[in-house]
Image (tube, grey):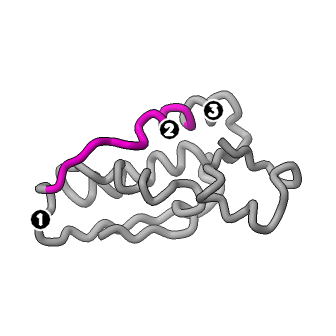
Amino acid sequence: MVFVSDGVSSILSDDEVVDLARDSPDPKTAAERILSFAEELSGGEDNATAIVVPLAGWGKIHGPDKTKALREYRRRQAGEHPDRYICSMFTCRMHSRKRASETNVKCV
């Protein structure tokens, strides 16, 4: 079970969080992977918290990393534009309030 603050959920999709946590050797590593990627994209603009609670079956569930290509693309975009906040339209709550042109948000 993974709990994240809005500093993570406003940056990463649920699928990205799952893919970052999956196959981690322990909950601490899973949380570190989630936070590291969220902070890489946001530049540390917001407080970010991730709590990973190991439930029965930890480490037994495996699957494909469905968001790997998206994460690599977003990482490249963040590196090219470090002053911009990179989001996915379906996770960006900013766009429900303002147009992208009114913020420093770039949708991918």
User: How far apart in space, not on screen, are marks 2 and 1 (Cα)?
Assistant: 27 Å
User: How far apart in space, not on screen, are marks 3 and 1 (Cα)?
Assistant: 36 Å
Circle 2 sits on which residue?
70
Circle 1 sits on which residue?
57
Query: Which of disc 1 and disc 3 is earlier in sequence?
Result: 1
Is mark 3 in CB contact (under 8 Å) with mark 1?
A: no
Q: Where is residue 71 in the image (x, y as percent from the top left)?
A: 48, 39
Under mark 1, the amino acid is Gly
| Residue displayed at 24% across by 60% down | 27
Residue 66 counted in the magenta span: yes
**In the image, which is nearer the foreground, mark 3 or mark 2?**
2
Q: Where is residue 40 in the image (x, y as percent from the top left)?
A: 54, 43
Circle 3 sits on which residue?
77
Q: Residues within 10 Å of mark 1 (few under 14, many from 20)?
A: few
Q: In which quarter of the image is the N terminus?
A: bottom left
What residue span does the magenta drawing correspond to? 61-74
When the figure is inspected, residue 49 is found, relative to residue 103, above or below; the finding is below
Residue 72 counted in the magenta span: yes
